[in-house]
Image: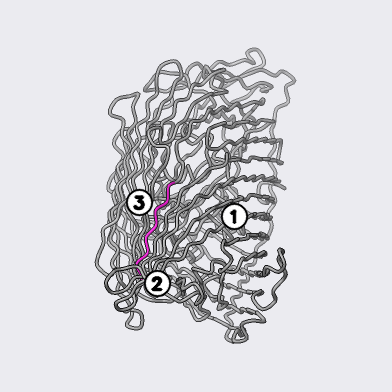
Amino acid sequence: MKRFYIFITIIFSFLTASAQYGGGSSVVGKISGTVVDSVTKQPMDYVPVSIFKTGGKAVINGVVTDSKGNFRIDNIHPGSYRLNVSFMGYPAKNVTEVVTTDSKPDKNIGTVLLAPSRKMLKEVVVTGQANLIENHIDKIVYNADKDLTATGGNAGDVLQKVPMVSMDLNGNVAIRGDQNVKVLINGKPSGATSASLADVLKTIPAAQIKSIEVITSPSAKYDAEGSAGIINIITKQTNISGFSGSISGGVGTRQNNGNLNLNYNKNRFSLSINAGGNLTWPQTSITNFNQDFQNGNRHIVQNSAGTSRVKRYGTISSVTANYDFNAYNQLSSTFRYNKGGFNTNSLTNASKTNYSYLNNPDSTYSYTTNGQSHNSISGFDWTLDYTHKFNKDGTHNIIFSGEWSHSSVVTDFANIFTPEKLIDQKQNINGINNEYTIQADYTVPVNKMLKIEAGGKEVIRRLSADNQYFDPTNGSFVYDPLNSSTYNYNQNVTAGYTVLTFTLPKSYSILAGARVENTSIHGVPQSAGQTNLTPFNNDYLIYIPSLTLQKQISATQTIKLSYSKRITRPSLTFLNPYLSKTNPLAETEGNPSLSPEVSQSFELNYNTFIKSSLINASVYYRHITGVIENIAQPIAVDPTTGLNGTLTQYHNADVNNSWGFNFFTSVNPIKMLTVRTNINVYTYSPSPYAAYSYYFTNTQTRVQYNIFLSVSANLPKDLIAELFAVENSPRYTLQGQSPSFSILGLGVKKQIFNKKASIGINTLEPFNKYKNFDSRTTSPGLIQTSHFAFPFRSVGLTFSYSFGKLTFATPKQKKGDVDEEKQDQSGSPGGAPSGGR
């Protein structure tokens, strides 16, 4: 077995520095003033104001402005000072030569005017609705805490409104229609999202989410996993000194949730605690499922109709602590715990009819299935990061990081058939996932034109699954070792990267990188009833180049051309050769010889900022080889009843070429109104490999789309209203299509208590109690259709309240998380997700 080793040796020395505030007089005074927006002439609250000694670089003290824009800095010794006033979307302003004396210790500097920035060299910020969308050079940022209709929902509700992101009925996330997405939480992978992403997203309250970052062309510094790109969910934290917190939640006809956030920051220590959860009311769905098995002049038709009742719950909490030993060394740690699950009760009436070539029924068989299942997900993520800065501004640094992710997935279910010609079944499936990560990242600015980043990473994954099968015996269930199985899966990924950032004359920038990843897989499937199962190995080495060329046309216009290579590794389920009969009418079997999908993407992007409006347009091409497809074939299941079913296997079956166009904008036609839209149109054009062309029934080029539209209004008396709509086309596969998806939502929020609290009402699908979803699968000898009706109409009340006494603390250098991509201060490409990657 070939193994790729990467060694990184970085020699650094710890530097020490001290800063001293001088002043021999015992007289102290104060410096005060008012901060006002230069355009609207309105006072600005929560604006940080810092004070420095004239000529000094160390901050002495600071405050934030109150609701009337006023600030006051106390305990100031006589001397000469400089004030720094900064706020998001505004260039920082320095007020110099602020002098106090023994005879005049108090100084009022009057009104400080802040002008909105129109020269966003590094990013363009939409200022229409409280900076809801930010367009950075390397990513799109959706500030979920500014979205009034997200309150009371979960992470899935928020993701539906993020530019370039879509979700289907089952909660599967896609970027530009591709579901091979890598999802991070605060810049780090989570074992929970690896186990069951769709279910985990339903456990995260929207109130915990600060922002969501979408990265479509990651540089070589990022892990290669996720051919569509990266989604980074940033949770709420604060660097404001003192004690503060907030509480929020919602009660509705479909789901209820609550969230508590506490923050403490004093001197060089900060602590943040977040806890939240949600609970859905029981929801009853209606299903219809039809199969037509064809064999020459005869065919078998199987129909089923039933209902399923689901109740879902979830909770997620975290504790983050940071300590700055001095200006050059920082230690940070986060512990996050999550638990969630859902219970399902279902009742299905089914029938099977044999037809002859004359289309006359020969025989009919009917049965009923009563099903119950219990599903739970739990786990934790523990991260530890140490950062050493070689200079005061932190641009030359090294970051050592470690993470342990643990998750447990339990699925217990039973199916009872009446009459008992099909065998009743009960299964208990327990899965454990442990993932250990160590990483080092080094950044050095060589000169004004060149920055070098390099690092290495080792990921150790250890997964196990225990599938216990029980047979009915004398009215009870007895353990069946022949149909039970175990599965142990080990995966090691060793990686190293180098990224070069060039800042060139005439506003050109180049980001060039290379990454190498070696993957080593060892799987051990075992089952007493399947003696053909043997251990398997699968090793491969992948080289990942990336390149971005950017031109700053003007202060508000940017054009960018980028290339990236990504992979999608087959999951442990796809690799497991065990023949699973969890559903006796829909068997599945993995393939241990699967290779990763390899995706190469080219994108041309144009961005402009016109006053408070943002326009962003992209044309892209994606070429994917070795696409992993699930291929369904008809099989005979039970000779006594004549029932047929399907066997689904996984293969690297085709090549897909996709062209796409993405356009999103945020405009303010009038001051109080913001209109946002996101349109993504792309093609699906598979070319099957010869060995699998027989199974492909959908090889023509298809056009698919995702559309989002919202209108929000800032009304008098602190009222905010928003109306939004989502429309997703059917998603095509090699053997059919999955359902289309649409949603309509409306929300109104009232801010009270000087904007420290709010109450609101939200509704989804007010005109439709159920949403209907239709899908179709066609394979040689099989036509399969399904209809699913899910209750979607909901009305909910929401609330939020912020509390605490705050003072301003100097913003800390962001820590480099396990996969962090730093924001280039020169405005060249290669920026970073907030709070790490």
Dot 3 or dot 1, earlier in sequence: 3
Quadrant of the image containing the C terminus: bottom right
Q: Earlier in the sequence, mark 3 or mark 2?
A: 2
Residue picked out by circle 2: 627
Q: Residue 2's mark?
A: none
- Chief secondary structure of the magenta portion: strand
User: How far apart are the alpha carbons under marks 2 and 1?
Assistant: 31 Å
Residue at the disc numbered 3: 740
SS type, badge 3: loop
Image-based side of 580 in relation to 648, left or right: right
> Residue 620 falls in which quadrant of the image?
bottom left
Which residues, given as a range, are shown in magenta? Answer: 782-789
Q: Are marks 3 and 1 in contact (CB under 8 Å)?
A: no
Answer above or below: position of 225 versus 723. Answer: below
Please state which amino acid type lies under the numbered disc 1: Asp
* Residue 601 on image: x %, y %: 35, 65
Residue 513 in percent (x, y) is at 44, 66
